[in-house]
Image (spheres, grey):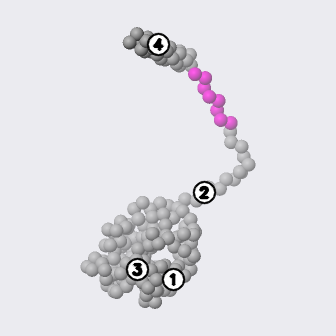
Amino acid sequence: MTDVVGEYEHGVVRVFLLDAGLRAEIQETGAYDAFCTALGITGINADDVLQLETLSLEDMPLADFLQSGYDANEDDLTEYQFQLDAVSDSDAMVLIVRSGAFVERPATFATEGPARLIATLREPDFEVPMTPLPNPDPTAVLEDVPAKKKPSDAAMSGRIATIALLLMALLVWLMIRIAG
């Protein structure tokens, strides 16, 4: 099976369960090249990936960790509760991957194999991906910009009065300066 990260996707967290071989390779190298190969993608931004040993959570279930750490959507957590509880009760390594980790977009990746997708959760600021609307006639000319409205006589009189007051203030300041 495959899943897709949309070009404009934001606010989605995916939880991957790693098999023993992939887990050992990531622990040994500290890089995610083997993970990318398992997913069938070219690269991943490591800043948006959290490597987590489930035993390090002690008495906290993985679902609670995702709720407190990523503020994951309650409905999504309920939907994946069984898978998350099963991983919490084992000695496993999971990678928590945000949408921003996928370098190339749109990205289609494998959800089975050495890195198995066990949950896709939305964060609170999840936005629906927006695609640009097609322009049916790109050669069409927009309407002319409306002409600027001519200032009224009252507006012009106010501007002239303001300039006159500024000139008088400047003249008074100059007289004080010369006399002082």
Residue type of the residue flagged with mark 1: Ala
Among the two numbered marks 3 and 2 on one chain, the one whose residue lies closer to the N terminus: 3
In the orientation shown, which residue stands out farthest toward the right? 139
Residue 170 vertical position relative to residue 13 in the rendered view, above or below = above
Residue type of the residue flagged with mark 4: Leu
Q: Residues within 10 Å of mark 3 (few under 14, many from 20)?
A: many
Q: Nearer the viewer, mark 3 or mark 2?
A: 3
Magenta span has 131? Answer: no
Magenta part of the chain: 144-151
Tag of residue 171:
4
Residue 43 in picture, x, y percent from top left: 54, 74
Tag of residue 94:
3
In the orientation shown, which residue stands out farthest toward the left? 59
Residue holding disc 2: 132
Secondary element type, mark 3 = strand
**Of 129 and 174, which appears nearest the observer?**
174
Residue holding disc 1: 34
